Amino acid sequence: MMRYMQVFLFVSLSLMLGSTLALKLDASICDSKYCDRTADRADWGDVPALKGLFNKREHFSIHLPLSPTHLVTTDSLFAAKYSNGQLIAISELNRADYTYLNASSYSLIDWANIVFHKHRKSTKPKNIEDLRAWNETLFIKKMILNAEKISFVEKKNYKIYLMEGKKNGPYQNVAYLVNENVPNSIFQIEFDRFPTRDIYQILNSIP
């Protein structure tokens, strides 16, 4: 009987601790309106793809405007600046940069799916480490999605997410390129002083 009571108390305590932890995790979700924002499907089909400076990256290619005045090229960054002050920067984000994902089962593709398609009322994961990562990701949505317009387009192997009119950070317009064949990397394309139509043309040049 004593052994039964010990097991019963242990199970009850575990359930209580689990419930308390879950509540704390839920409480950590931000209360900003941006936590519930999701990306709208867009159609840039009427905007012709740019034919310009061809830039071949490891996992995708893109055309940029011709005649940049300055170029910066490293293993992780490509940047082009133009005489009119326009700037475009392409960098790679890696899963290792998001340490709170380490113990979870999430790839960066999963991370992007949460950021751009999920919200506080979406079905949460049951695994505790996935739940931690889920809530952390929802929490940072308020920084990532602090923009006037958020949209996405789908291509053969890619999803391109575009945040227009960002209210924080040095760039007004930022795109994330998600390649389904590269689950733990996302390619970030940042635009400064580019008109909206020019951005669409550049992003449409990605095959």
Image: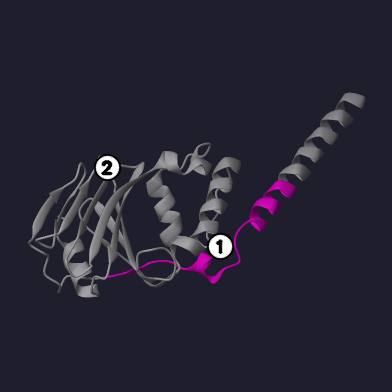
Left or right, 3 with reference to 41: right
Q: Which mark is residue 22?
A: none
| Disc 1, SS | loop
Q: Residue 107, position in %: x, y? A: 41, 43
Reply above or below: 64 against 94: below
Left or right of 116? Residue 83 is left
> Which residue is at 55% across, 52% downward?
136
Q: Quadrant of residue 33?
A: bottom right
Residue 163 visible in the displayed image: no
Picture mark count: 2
Residue found 57% across the figure and 41% down from its top = 129
Q: Magenta residues, as a range?
A: 19-42
- What colouring method underlies this structural image? one colour
Element type at marker 2?
loop
Does residue 25 belong to the magenta stretch? yes
Q: Residue placed at 41% from the left, 55% from the top? A: 113
Of label 2 and label 1, which has the lower sequence position?
1
Q: Amino acid at mark 2?
A: Asn
Q: Residues within 10 Å of mark 1 (few under 14, many from 20)?
A: some
Q: Residue furthest left?
A: 51
Q: Residues within 10 Å of mark 2 (few under 14, many from 20)?
A: few
Q: Residue shown at 45%/55% (left/top)?
A: 114
Residue on which disc 2 sits: 181
For residue 40, above or below residue 178: below
For the C terminus, the quadrant is bottom left
**Mark linked to residue 120:** 1
Instruction: Name the spot of residue 53 as percent of width and height, x first.
Output: 9, 56
66 and 34: which is toward the camera? 66
